[in-house]
Amino acid sequence: MVGGYALRYALDHPAVGRVTAIGRRSLGISHPKLKEVLHKDFGDCTALAEALSEQDGAIFCLGTYTGAVSDADLRKTTVDYTAEFARVLHGSSPNAVFSFLSGSGADQTGRSRMAFARYKGEAEKALLAAGFPRVYLFRPAYIYPVEPRKEPNFSYRLLRVIYPVFRVLFPNQVIPADDLARAMVDVAVQVAERRGVVLENRDIRAMAKSR
């Protein structure tokens, strides 16, 4: 969801000259800036070394929902796939900026009782240790889909229904998916000296308002 918005925004961004989209299935779109690479196994990204060469930044949105897969698969998708992609990207483009879709409550200490928080924290630590000059860790709360979709579970269906009220009562606990995507792209193309930056939901909303 977020990756789709990021892709569309990057393709229209005047500072972006080329976009390499990596995924398991074809996007079904064409654009003069777009190079599409199909890759089935994110547990081994070695074959992506050439595609990831000479890249200035990565917008990494791969993930899954808690409860949608087993705990082992949740950790594999959240931690192992992220670390493996980062390993190959750094080997091919060591100066790239890494913009990572983490999550609210991500715990780098590993002490959280929530598996999602522990695994996102572990992935964050792996990225900060990977050697990239700049890493941006986005920790959104509830991501509002903006466009209608099939929600993954009852909680998300409920949140979509009550969103108009929820965003008024708890503005710093929500972020529209397109605003989040634009922020993730913007930090990758800007010139900055900061190395590792954690952006909580409140920070992401501020970035969206300042655009």
Image (cartoon, rainbow, N blue to C red):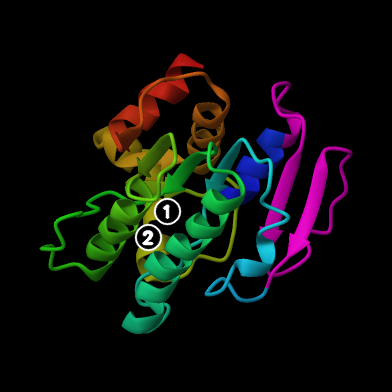
Q: Amino acid at mark 1?
A: Val
Q: Which residues are magenta?
A: 11-39
Q: Quick check: is 122 in the magenta stretch?
A: no
**To which quarter of the image does residue 24 belong?**
bottom right
- The percent coordinates of residue 11 (x first, y second) are 74, 35
- The percent coordinates of residue 82 (x first, y second) are 45, 61
Q: CA distance from mark 2 to mark 1?
A: 5 Å
Tag 2–tag 1 contact (CB < 8 Å): yes
- On-image quarter of the N terminus: bottom right
Q: How many residues crowd around disc 2 within 10 Å: few (fewer than 14), some, or many (20 or more)?
A: few
Q: Is residue 123 above or below residue 139?
A: below
Q: Nearer the viewer, residue 161 or 70?
A: 70
Which residue is denoted by mark 2 in the rendering?
158
Q: Quick check: is 18 in the magenta stretch?
A: yes
Residue drawn at 68 percent across, 68 percent down: 47
Left or right? Give the position of 162 relative to 7.
Answer: left
Q: How many residues crowd around disc 1 within 10 Å: few (fewer than 14), some, or many (20 or more)?
A: few
Q: Amino acid at mark 2?
A: Leu
